[in-house]
Amino acid sequence: MNKKTIEKAAALRRLWSAFWQARPLLTAVNFGLFEHTKTGASARQVAGRIKADPRATGILMDALAGLGLLKKSGEKSKYRNSTESIYRNTEEAGLFLVKDSPYYQGAIVRHADNLWRSWSQLDESLRTGKPAPRESGEFSLDAFIMGMHNLAALRAGDIIKAIGMKGVGSALDLGGGPGTYSMEMARAGVGKVTLFDRADVIKIAARNIKNQKKQKQENGVGNNGNIGFMKGDFNSDDFGGGYDLIFMSNILHSNSYEQCEDLLGRARAALNPGGRAAINEFYLEDNRIAPLSGALFSINMLVNTEAGCTYTHGELKGFLKKAGFRDIKAKVLFGDAIVVTGRVSG
Ligand SMILES: C[S@@+](CC[C@H](N)C(=O)[O-])C[C@H]1O[C@@H](n2cnc3c(N)ncnc32)[C@H](O)[C@@H]1O
């Protein structure tokens, strides 16, 4: 076999086996494993703490060490697994996979387990064009919403800065989820922020905002401070008016084209003269294939929503244009996100 063919086959093998790398991480986070390896522990000790089988835990922890999430030391036996080896979190695990880190990403990893189930039904979605059916109880809303917080906590500051809060007295965070962007807007000096979302999500947002406030001891950002809540369905319910800014972060992709057009039309009507709409979305070039993250995110919407997809750069601008916004500007951030803004006439 020629070398090039062997290399290409190896690349294909890396592709089809990519889930072999994801699954150990998802399972480890489900069991809270990294909380028990902060200062070093053997597989047997960890198994006892997470209530798991010692042999299985050893195999999992070796794979996690191979993946660079644990450091293993003290292995003496060359024959059978010894019980003396000690595993400790690597810097990455300490930064992202233990709950007391400000950069904790565990909720989004738990949400990946929500997605694992829907993505596993892609064959069926391909046949029917419909999202994966969801058994009751198998989707964790808390993991989804707090996962959004994990992701947004790394980016909200830059995104809100890119939009610019100068002159914004009143803002609506439509589909605001955990409230991470609402908090960032309040922090940037917006006098009144309204977070609109479904009733069960508002409960999570209120808890998150309270916890964040406690952690950061910040002034002016609070449950009942300058962040207010409004419950409803943004596609059918009124979301108030008199806003200087309506921020729509990662909400359009779960809507159909028609729903996006309608939403942008109603957003325009809810803005003060001279007010702005700002969209934050997954970035996808007009060819719909690049960057890869944007193309793959469309699969996520195929298996999880009735008619959502990743909208392209041109389509996002088009939604604003069609709704009558002017001065439309787009900025790509972090290589995989796009912020598009438009203004209503003053
Ligand atoms: C992907 S999350 C984004 C959360 C947040 N904006 C962010 O960027 O971190 C989408 C949010 O929109 C909310 N949402 C989706 N469809 C909605 C609807 N029709 N009415 C109200 N909220 C909705 C979800 O509950 C969720 O909180």
Image (cartoon, grey):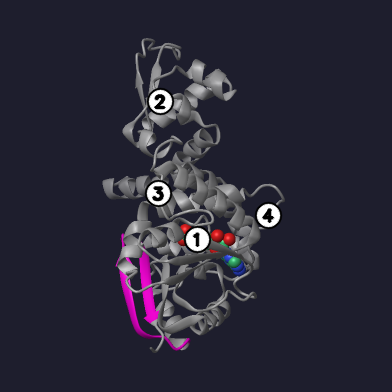
Residues under labels 2 and 3: Cα distance?
29 Å
Question: Which residue corresponds to the image point at 38% horizontal and 12% vertical from the top-left?
Answer: 78
Tell me the crowding category of disc 1: few under 14, some 14 to 19, or many 20 or more residues within 10 angstroms, Cα based.
many
- The amino acid type found where label 3 is placed reads Glu
Name the mark nearer the viewer: 2 or 3.
3
The question of residue 124 being in magenta is answered with no
Q: Quadrant of the C terminus?
A: bottom left
Mark 3 Cβ inside 8 Å of ligand 1 = no
Tell me the crowding category of disc 2: few under 14, some 14 to 19, or many 20 or more residues within 10 angstroms, Cα based.
some
Mark 2 vs mark 1: which is more N-terminal? 2
- The amino acid type found where label 2 is placed reads Lys
- Residue 43: percent from the left, percent from the top? 48, 19
- The residue carrying mark 2 is 38
* Horizontal arrangement in the rendering, residue 296 relative to residue 291 (left or right): right
Residues under labels 1 and 3: Cα distance?
13 Å
Looking at the rendering, the stretch of residues picked out in magenta corresponds to 323-342
Name the mark nearer the viewer: 4 or 1.
1
- The amino acid type found where label 1 is placed reads Ile
- Dot label at residue 227: 1
Residue 65 position (above or below residue 307):
above
- The residue carrying mark 3 is 218
